[in-house]
Amino acid sequence: MMPYVLLFALFLKPVTNPNSSDMEPLTRTQILVVMGVTAIILLIIAKVWQYFGSVALIKIQLSPDGLLYGAALAGVIIVASSIIYRVWPAYRQSADAYLELVLKPLVWPDLIWLGLLPGLSEELLFRGVMLPALGYDLLAVILSSVVFGILHLSGSQQWPYVVWATLVGFALGYSALMTDNLLVPITAHIITNWMSSTLWKFNHRTSDASS
């Protein structure tokens, strides 16, 4: 969903058991601050890379087709994720641990930012700048997807989530390559984050209410 785990470590207390895969819970304020700071950092990296690398940014072309393609891609990603969640226990455990860390402390209106901030900042960097900088071809899509996936690693037990994030990154990158429109992956990313977080919060509303 988003590579905020790199900054989560700034807020986490040392884990009592170093062999445990559990992470200390975060507060709502901590998560919101990390989301905002990370988005700013990614935007700065993208603009600096674009400036000093003389990178031609993939344009955002506002059009009904771009929105439609993005929404369709989001639907495919969400359905695929739901299927994998059901048939791959390791991914289910990994995703639940990751999403519980991020989503459990948040209230419903916070999910708006959870969609917008990563969707805009990550797509600007990983697709908008990184793809043209690496050659704007299939190899560039693969390389940027691997980096995107690795940045979702929060521990040795989280590799299934990293694999899925890499595949999603490939789909987003390929959509940008095929349409030459950054609006497509941005729309897909935002809708995917909104829908996946909403579904997770809804399915875990009982445990949230009792905690």
Image (cartoon, rainbow, N blue to C red):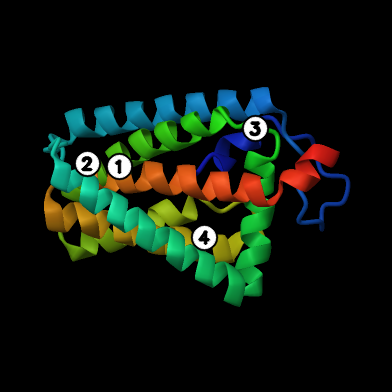
Residue at the bottom extreme, as displayed: 87
**Amino acid type, label 4:** Val
Instruction: Give whichever of discs 3 and 1 has the lower sequence position.
Output: 3
Answer whether labels 2 and 1 touch (C-beta < 8 Å).
yes
Q: Which residue is mark 3?
A: 106
Q: Which residue is mark 1?
A: 186
Looking at the image, is mark 3 or mark 4 nearer the viewer? 3
Q: Residue at x 20, y 52 (%)?
A: 176
The location of residue 196, given as percent across then percent down, is 52, 50
User: 66 and 175: which one is in front?
Assistant: 66
Q: Which residue is mark 2?
A: 183
The location of residue 16, given as percent across then percent down, is 88, 45
Answer whether labels 3 and 2 touch (C-beta < 8 Å).
no
Q: Tell me the element at label 2.
A: helix
**Amino acid type, label 2:** Leu
Instruction: Give whichever of discs 3 and 4 has the lower sequence position.
Output: 3
Please rate how many residues cluster around mark 1, counting C-alpha atoms within 10 Å: few if below 14, some from 14 to 19, many from 20.
many
